[in-house]
Amino acid sequence: MATAKPGFQRKKRGFEHASHLMQKDIRKAGETRGFAVTRLLTHWAEIVGEQTAKMARPVKVSYGREGLGATLTVLTTGAQAPMLQADLPRIKDRVNACYGYAAISRIRITQTAPTGFAEGQVVFGHRPSAPQGPDPASKSRARDLALGVADDSLRCALEALGANVYARSNVKKD
């Protein structure tokens, strides 16, 4: 059995969330674009609202030479830019609330085509969620399988589990 190097102490932390393990790397990647608070990137829809998040996304925070406040660059399509322009004071207030102080003094709107150019394809909406549930055939097979269970809550749980298992096995076969 190998022994540890002198002066080395093993950290006894147990299991950690993946977000805690990746936090330093995420912060470093965010800082390259000027985001001191990565929460602005990860919780954009919560900060500015769903409607605004569908129209725009943050790209960069740049600090000017004068040192008074930063400029947030937001990417949007040309058709959405006038509506976003009218909403800039509210966006600035919400972003500064996220930072906890008046960090952002200006917001610059950059327009692009919906398919983007330099940044790749720009998706302003959220990705669609996974399929809503198993197909009726999977539900029927699972119901038949759990038919002999007397306890109602256990039977419902087994039906749901069975339907999900059958649905996944159907997806793998396709």
Image (tube, helix red, strand yellow):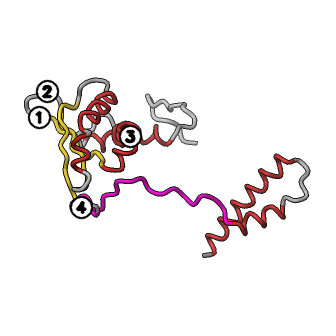
In this view, the mark in front (1 or 3): 3
- Which numbered disc flags the more N-terminal residue, 2 or 3? 3
64 on left or right of 165: left
Label 2 and label 4: CA atoms lie apart by 32 Å
Mark 2 or mark 4: whose residue is earlier in sequence: 2
Measuring 24% from the left and 38% from the top, which residue is drawn there? Answer: 88
**According to the image, label 4 marks what residue?**
113
Q: Are marks 1 and 4 in contact (CB under 8 Å)?
A: no
Q: Give the residue number, with chain letter if any, for mark 3.
A: 49
Q: Position of residue 41 (x, y in %)?
A: 34, 42
Marks 2 and 1, Cα distance to the nearest angstrom? Answer: 7 Å
Which-is-in-front pick, marks 2 and 4? 4
Q: Quadrant of residue 158?
A: bottom right
First in residue order: circle 4 vs circle 3: 3
**Residue shown at 57% from the left, 37% from the top:** 15
Dots 2 and 1: beta carbons under 8 Å? yes
Residue displayed at 28% across by 33% down: 90
For the residues bearing labels 1 and 3, Cβ distance under 8 angstroms: no
Residue linked to disc 1: 64
**Residue type of the residue flagged with mark 1:** Gly
Q: What residue is shown at x 22% (from left), y 50% (from top)? A: 81
Q: Is residue 138 depicted above or below 80 in this figure?
A: below
Residue 125: image location, x then y, percent: 38, 54
For mark 2, what is the residue?
68
Rounded to the nearest angstrom, the CA distance separating label 4 from label 3 is 22 Å
